[in-house]
Amino acid sequence: MNIFAIGDVHGCLNELTSLHKKILTHDKFDVNNDILVYLGDYIDRGRESKRVIDQILKLKNNKIQTINLMGNHDEFMINFFFNNKNNIENWLNFGLDQTLRSYGIEVVDFIKDGFGDDIIEQLRKTLLSKMSEAHINFFKNLELSFSSEK
């Protein structure tokens, strides 16, 4: 069993696609035994966060074994989305605007009048309406750690 680790994708789809191609066509890659371990930080900074998640889910659906770990950027999403935290002001410093834009949301349309809980709740509801069930489950099911017998 080989383990291929991929970290800090940050919404960069072209780079992820290129890396997937190199791994999946590697002469030692065994689709039945090898694992792709993503080290987190799928979102923020790059323009294609939504499509990065789509790409990873597509591999899973094609029976490629993947482990998806949570990075600190993903934790921002989880805290905002599932734990109802008003962390937008801080998250903006880490690339939130690019992530929301990939889901068709302009964050400035919401925060132009501040960061009040009512504004943030409306943003949360809008994001929920734009995210597919598969994406919601992706973030809900991120792991904190992974270990192997080897």
Image (cartoon, rainbow, N blue to C red):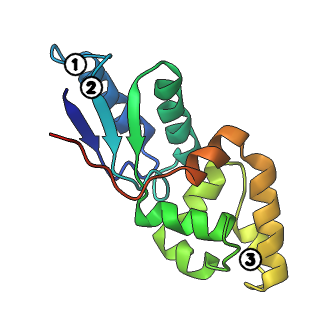
Whole-angstrom CA distance, mark 1 to mark 2, is 7 Å
Horizontal arrangement in the rendering, residue 69 relative to residue 31 (left or right): right
The amino acid beneath tag 1 is Phe
Question: Residue 49 location in percent, x, y?
Answer: 53, 47
Residue in the picture at 74% in, 56% down: 127
* Upstream in sequence: badge 2 or badge 3: 2
Horizontal arrangement in the rendering, residue 83 relative to residue 99 (left or right): right
Would you place residue 66 above or below residue 7 in this image? above
Residue in the picture at 55% in, 73% down: 92
Identify the element where label 3 is drawn.
Answer: helix
Q: Residues within 10 Å of mark 1 (few under 14, many from 20)?
A: some
Disc 3: which residue: 111
Q: Quadrant of residue 3?
A: top left
Whole-angstrom CA distance, mark 3 to mark 1, is 46 Å
Question: Residue 78 location in percent, x, y?
Answer: 59, 63
Disc 1: which residue: 29
Q: Residues within 10 Å of mark 3 (few under 14, many from 20)?
A: some
Quadrant into which the C terminus falls: top left
Q: Nearer the viewer, residue 87 or 2?
A: 2
Disc 2: which residue: 34
* Upstream in sequence: badge 1 or badge 2: 1
Would you place residue 141 above or below residue 62 in this image? below
* Upstream in sequence: badge 3 or badge 1: 1
The amino acid beneath tag 3 is Ile
Contact flag, marks 1 and 2 (Cβ < 8 Å) = yes
The amino acid beneath tag 2 is Asp
